[in-house]
């Protein structure tokens, strides 16, 4: 999952030029969701 | 240090040697731009419109507030806003700023000082430095009573893990983009 999330972040920045702040925040929320689903 | 010095000299010599060829290339790009087929804005020379000190300070306050990870994440923020969004800097200027941030003593955040100077002179350098470092001091002072509680929280740990991974992806993307600009375009 870690590798997949990092790759997804890379693709999002390269292809969609998503704002970095939202990307980092989104990563944090996914991390939180993953923790809650465990 | 020796490696940095040698690399700098090699690139400097290469740049001087390629300057004549580059002039012809610039003419070709300029004529292409007139025909509507020019290079993208990020690689063209930046049209240096005056930047207000308020905007500059506000930008670095924002970056200093939301930046997480390391100085290398800073580069992603700088590129997406200063180069791609507002055009305050070119890719080349950003790479110069990163180089200055790397070889000067202290954190990579000193890149902000260089950028402030390039964009708005000495006042810009001072305000950019203040803007990027000030939020850290405020946040540390405000959050120090909560740190022990945050450390014990598994939820906060999960959130920070996710932020770390997204930051890794961000750094990889910027490394790829700037690597292409540094090694291929010039």
Image (cartoon, coloured by chain):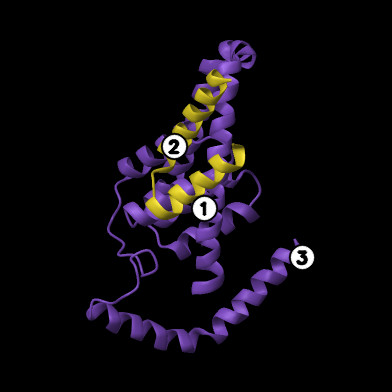
Chain colours: A yellow, B purple
Q: Chain of mark 2?
A: B
Q: Is residue B82 shown above or below A31?
A: below
Q: Is residue B160 shown above or below A8?
A: above
Q: Secondary structure at mark 1?
A: helix
Q: Quadrant of residue A15?
A: bottom left
* The disc label shown at residue B131, or none: 2
Q: Is residue B61 shown above or below A14?
A: above
As rendered, which of B58 and B33 lies closer to the eye? B33
User: Mark 1: few, some, or many residues within 10 Å (few <14, many ≥20)?
Assistant: many
Residue B166 relative to residue A23: left or right = right
**Same-subunit check for callouts 3 and 2:** yes
In three-dimensional space, the C-alpha distance between marks 3 and 1, rounded to whole angstroms, equals 28 Å
As rendered, which of B45 and A18 lies closer to the eye? A18
Q: Chain of mark 3?
A: B
Residue B60 relative to residue A6: left or right = left
Q: Quadrant of residue B17?
A: bottom right
The residue most toward the front is A38
Q: Earlier in the sequence, mark 2 or mark 1?
A: 2
Tell me the quadrant of the picture where the C terminus of chain A can be found: top right
Give the labeled residue for mark 3: B2
Q: Secondary structure at mark 3?
A: helix
User: Mark 3: few, some, or many residues within 10 Å (few <14, many ≥20)?
Assistant: few
The location of residue B18, given as percent across then percent down, is 53, 85
Tell me the quadrant of the picture where the N terminus of chain A can be found: top right
Numbered disc in front, either 3 or 1: 1
* The disc label shown at residue B173, or none: 1
- Marks 2,1: beta carbons within 8 A: no
Q: Earlier in the sequence, mark 3 or mark 1?
A: 3
Can residue B109 be seen here? The reply is no
Numbered disc in front, either 2 or 1: 1
The location of residue B151, given as percent across then percent down, is 63, 16
- Marks 3,2: beta carbons within 8 A: no
């Amino acid at each position: 999952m870690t590798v997949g999330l990092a790759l997804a972040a890379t693709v999002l920045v390269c292809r969609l030029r998503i704002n970095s702040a939202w990307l980092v925040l989104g990563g944090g929320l996914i991390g939180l969701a993953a923790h809650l689903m465990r | 240090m020796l490696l940095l010095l040698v690399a700098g000299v090699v690139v400097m010599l290469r740049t001087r040697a390629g300057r004549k060829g580059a002039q012809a290339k610039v003419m070709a790009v300029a004529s292409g731009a007139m025909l509507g087929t020019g290079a993208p804005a990020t690689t063209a020379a930046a049209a240096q419109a005056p930047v207000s000190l308020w905007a500059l300070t506000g930008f670095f306050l924002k970056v200093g507030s939301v930046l997480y990870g390391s100085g290398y994440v800073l580069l992603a923020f700088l590129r997406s806003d200063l180069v791609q969004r507002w055009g305050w800097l070119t890719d080349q200027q950003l790479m110069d700023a990163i180089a200055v941030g790397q070889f000067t003593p202290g954190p990579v955040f000193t890149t902000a000082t260089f950028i402030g100077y390039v964009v708005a002179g000495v006042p810009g350098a001072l305000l950019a430095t203040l803007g990027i470092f000030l939020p850290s001091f405020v946040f540390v002072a405000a959050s120090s009573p909560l740190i022990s509680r945050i450390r014990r929280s598994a939820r906060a740990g999960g959130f920070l893990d996710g932020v770390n991974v997204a930051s890794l992806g961000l750094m990889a993307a910027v490394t790829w983009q700037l690597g292409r600009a540094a090694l291929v375009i010039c």
